Structures are given as C-alpha cells and as structure tokens.
Amino acid sequence: MSGCKKIIIFVVVASFLVIPLGSSALARGYSVPPERNPAVMLVDGVVVRPFQFTSLVIGTVSFVVTFPWSALGGNWKEAYTKMMVEPARLTFKRPLGRF
C-alpha cells in the first residue's frame, strides 16, 4: 500500500472513532422535559388555577385600594409586582401541572 492510501485509511478510521464522542457531547446540552402526571395536571387545572385566579382578583382589588399609600411610600412598583404580576404569571403562564 502506498503512503497516501495509509493516510486516507487512518483518517477514515479515526473519524469513525471520534464522531460518536462529539455527538454525545452535543447531546448533553439538550434536556428532555420531565413527563407530567395527568392526575397532577387535572388537579392543577380544576383546583389550583381557580384559587390562583381568585388570588389575582383579590390582589388587583387590594392594589387599587392601597395604591395611594403605596405611591406615597414610594413602593408602588413592588406592590404591583407582588399583588398583580406574580399571581397573573402563576395563573396564566405557568405550564399545567408544574408547580
């Protein structure tokens, strides 16, 4: 065999050995979301979400009523976040069944 053929064979064999190592390193970067239990999703949709929506309504009413004092105290943004944004995010943006 000539020297050129030996180099080509070496490169081909080396690539067959190295390629699987690279793909497993790439696979580590991907994560599979955990499977959700349908019973937990049902309880979340039927029981927890209505309570969170109620919390959002109560928080909104409380924010509107207490806004003058929050504005005078300079913490209306914090009150807005705690009383309206976080309950809305938990009610409408959180994936079903994930707490």
Image (cartoon, grey):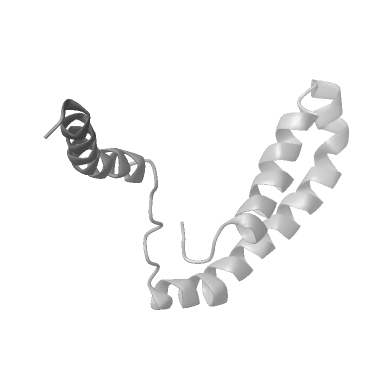
> Can you give x and y, in whole percent of width and height, for residue 11 in the image?
23, 33
Residue depicted at x 25% and y 38%: 15
Residue depicted at x 38% and y 41%: 29
Image quadrant occupied by the N terminus: top left
> Can you give x and y, in whole percent of width and height, for residue 62 in the image?
77, 48
In the picture shown, does residue 73 fall above or below 78?
A: above
Q: Quadrant of residue 91?
A: bottom right
In the picture shown, does residue 10 fall above or below 94?
A: above
> Can you give x and y, in whole percent of width and height, for residue 12 in the image?
23, 40
Q: Quadrant of residue 85?
A: top right
As drawn, the residue found furthest toward the front would be 2
Of residue 76 and residue 25, the one placed in the foreground of this image is 25
The answer to whether residue 54 is left or right of residue 9 is right
Residue depicted at x 79% and y 44%: 63
Residue depicted at x 18% and y 40%: 13
The answer to whether residue 98 is left or right of residue 73 is left
Of residue 54 and residue 85, the one placed in the foreground of this image is 85
Q: Quadrant of residue 83?
A: top right
As drawn, the residue found furthest toward the left would be 1
